[in-house]
Amino acid sequence: MEEYFGPSGRLAAALPGFEPRAGQAALAQAVFDSLECDEHLLAEAGTGTGKSLAYLIPALVSGQRVVVATATKALQEQLLTKDVPAAAAALGRRVRVAVLKGRQNYLCRKSLAGVDQLGGLFVSSEDAADYERLAEWIEATTTGDRAELPFEPRSALWAELSVGADRCAGRRCPFIASCYAEAARARAAEAELVIANHALYFADVAMRARTDGTGVLPEHDAVVFDEAHRLEEAAASWFGGRVSLARIRQLARDVERHARESESPPPARALADVDRAGAALVNAFDPNSGRRRLTAADEEELGYLGGDLCRRLRHLADDLAGSGEEADALARRTLALRADVEACMAHDDPDRVAWAEAGALAWAPVDVSEILREELWGSGPTAVLVSATLEPEFLRGRLGLDDARELVQPSPFDYREQALLYVPPRFPEPRSPGYDARLADEVVALCNLSRGRALVLTCSYRALHDLVERARPRIHYPLLVQGEAPRERLLEHFRDDVDSVLFATSTFWQGVDVAGESLSLLVVDKLPFSSPGDPLVEARCERIVRQGGDWFSDYALPAAVLQLRQGFGRLIRGHADEGVVAVLDSRLHTRAYGRRFLEALPPARLVLAREAVADFFGHGERATA
């Protein structure tokens, strides 16, 4: 790897401004060794290491077919448009690369023909209007990829037009020769490097387990999981299931479509019975907001309503089966939905947890480690897991990755010079009276000191809305709020409008890359412990206790540390960046576990007084709220 990453290496010759980094070279060598020796690797590489090139170069040099699976579309786009071309320049050759997405991202010619032939299957006039907007693109597209669209079509309309993993006729489809999804798979089969996402990769694992080894991805020798700290949640989501009204009604529309296309009478009564039973089940447990775990207290009502829906689904499957290949496929979909209903009813299964949320019931495995150990790590390709915040020992256990090399490379940034960590010691604790008002006062004061240029991260949507309501009238800079515009548009405005302030939660804790002056202040409202009332978190903690562990130190604390490190990583994105991270939670000083957080964070200078923040931003006077 020295040939590529050294001071006089190929990257230095091919890329103007390339700076050799010892951590990047070490990571590249570890990836190369892992691929050569067919050994899994857990690699934490701090922000600024240059991890993308550090795994792309050895992957392409190895001669193996490698899949890179990411958690975000932004990283996929960066890999395709920036990092792969840079790697190709260093290699001095063309790289055969393909991006592969789930089938639901592609236009379906069969569905489109059905819409055209039947005069439209639109749920609303808005869908019909969106379809008119799509017409020109439908005529011109060569990929059928929805990412090409200049606008986001309504979900119900796209569900009618897209392939859909559970409605694809596969080789039986009369449009197979011109299928966009199949064309994308064919391009991937010819590529040496395939870029996918975590969800698609787990779909591939699940399909290979159910079939004779045939998957949605081409055969490959190795997989790189970038943003690997998010793998557990992706696996839990994929290997679980949801029973939603949207899913029930999509199935009904597909059954009705098939009946029209085959000129046969639809099973109208069976469909009506399923819809009525599904609505009764979902509405009975709708928590209005958030998630509510299904427990023994729900057993009687859940058994009655869930059992009724299972019977209706069985009747529908019986009506469909034996009427041709497509009808049989619809019957299998119906029975798969029934299996998810049964999984949601099994609330007493220690290996599963079920809950209700808006418009749906859902379930997930409590522990994915054994599934991954059996289906992926034991018999799958060589796996390289990389992230800026991996917490290797923690994730090794959570993911069941028992035997793997391990590498930790710190960030090359000089945090002592570039960043300040402000933690006020006499701040009310999050659950104490007056905390919300004091938090808003502090955020307003800090944003005034930084002259905007701030990202404010909260740990929940409730906290986000409350903080915005309190702070908005007093912040005299452009205010951007998560939910008021699409995520990428908010980030675009935040980058361009240098003095703006962005309030956000959830996904903005990670995957946000805003270099330069636009992000000079990062405010975190409190330590990001997962809500103990979240059904999946609660079930994981219970499992740890049953096995003789400590739910707080074994799970809740390391998960929160990882999340805070992710949030901190939004601030410094380059050697020229500088700024302040403010964590407005005095528990960092007052609780024993506070030291665990502080030791895990980058070594920025810790200050206790707001005056130090004022000095950092060039204010000579004392700062007041």
Image: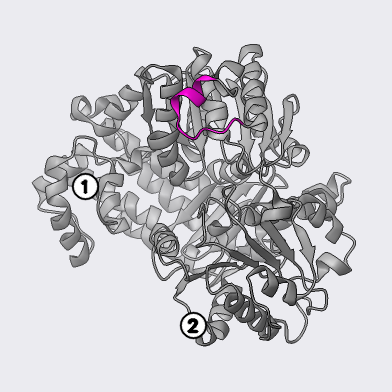
- Find residue 273 and report its horizontal and vertical position in percent: 36, 59
> What residue is shown at x 66% (from left), y 59% (from top)?
535
> In which quadrant will I find the N terminus?
top right
Label placed on residue 180? none
Q: Is residue 499 above or below residue 399?
A: below
What amino acid is at disc 1? Arg
> What residue is shown at x 55% (from left), y 49% (from top)?
342
**Can you identify the residue that label 1 sits on?**
257
Which of the pair 149/33 is nearer the observer?
33
Residue 539 in view, yes or no: no
Q: How is the image coloured?
A: one colour
Q: Is residue 607 left or right of residue 112?
A: right
Which SS class for mark 1?
helix
Q: Nearer the viewer, mark 2 or mark 1?
A: 2
Farthest residue to the front: give it: 620
Label placed on residue 476? 2
